[in-house]
Image (cartoon, rainbow, N blue to C red):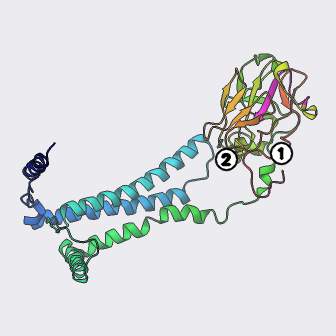
Amino acid sequence: MSDSNLVSTSSDTEVATSEQFSDPGVPEHKLRLGDTDPKAAKRSERIVIALFGLSILGTIGMMAAYFGLPQDTSIAGVRIQNLTLGLGLGFALLGIGLGAIHWAKSLMSDHEVVEERHSVESSPEARAEAIQKLQDGVADAGVARRGVLKGAAISAVALFPLSFAVPLIGEIGADWNISKFRHTVWRRGVRLATDPTNRPIKASEVTIGSAYHVIPYAEDIDEEVRPGSHAWLDEKAKAIVLMVRMEPNELKEEDDRKDWSYEGIVAYSKVCTHVGCPVALYERQTHHLLCPCHQSTFDMADGAKVVFGPAKRPLPQLPITVDSEGYLVAQSDFTEPVGPSFWERLK
Ligand code: FES
């Protein structure tokens, strides 16, 4: 290709580009209702105040629910607490968000501003001009004139952090005694029961390949920690177990644990040793148990050892046997703390 051809092509492209992307300019400015009608502006102001007021009520409602609702640990009680706290928090955020949007769209200046492109570093004059424009914008938005609106906005934003701070402050007097992490309600003779129906399980009904979600049978544990009691959810969270049955010859058991299973039935804590999610996805062909949170995988046929993922310890095993009626029972509590590691844990 000759040089003259190249020059000609470049020139054509410049012409085509300048025609294709000609500056459309700033569209015609349209006045809003509030720009011409003081009553409409006042109406918008009232709406913004109402929305910030909604946020304030949401924050107050959230705190009232936090302090006012009884500490009911039943499923229904926990749901009501979560619902009221969530609604309070939701309205607190929604009010601030909608109030700010409506304020900006209906009351703040919407004049188009064109700023010519210039070097990245601003000159002192440009910075002074920017500050002046900012101050003009604040004056134009009428923040100083609209005292009630300003007060509502400041109150809503100032109160909102309480939604987070109050629950944290509430933890200051909480029970930090960690000794309870070392024990669960399992002890010798407590029957294994189905979760959540609380029905004792006979060894004869557990078929090869089946998996059961297990809790301690309510009748066999102390009354103050039974289902419906204040402490039950905490105790259940520590004591939950996954029980499976496989052919006895598929089990690889340490010598000191050979009597911890019953005819191929093994029971392990369901609390993941990584950060405590419930492990519950059992694959019967491989005997692998998967934690859905970060994919730690435990081998139920080999002491629930970790075969994959971030967990560092096997799941603790619950020693089990059967009673005189054929029901599966615990031989003792777990012999080590369940769940993730913690600072004071010794092994
Ligand atoms: S909590 Fe189970 S893998 Fe992270």
| Relative horizontal placement of residue 275, taking residue 319 as reference (left or right) | left
Q: Is residue 140 above or below residue 223?
A: below
Q: Which residue is mark 1?
A: 336
Residue closest to the eye, 166 or 77? 166
Mark 1 vs 2, N-terminal side: 2
Three-letter amino acid code at the position of disc 1: Glu
- Give the residue drawn at x 68%, y 61%: 174
Is the CB of the residue bearing disc 2 within 8 angstroms of ligand 1?
yes
Q: Can you tell which quarter of the image residue 322 is in?
A: top right
- Give the residue drawn at x 76%, y 46%: 224
Residue 93 screen position, x and y as percent: 39, 57
- The crowd level at tag 1 (other Cα within 10 Å; few <14, some 14-19, many 20+) is some
Task: Give the residues drawn in magenta, as a range.
Answer: 258-268
| Relative horizontal placement of residue 141, taking residue 293 as reference (left or right) | left
Q: Is residue 47 above or below residue 247?
A: below
Dot 1: element: loop
Q: Main secondary structure of the magenta part?
A: loop
Residue closest to the eye, 307 or 152? 307
Q: Residue furthest front?
A: 2
Q: Which mark is residue 275?
A: 2
Residue 179 screen position, x and y as percent: 80, 55
Quadrant in which ligand 1 is drawn: top right
Residue 273 lies in the magenta stretch: no
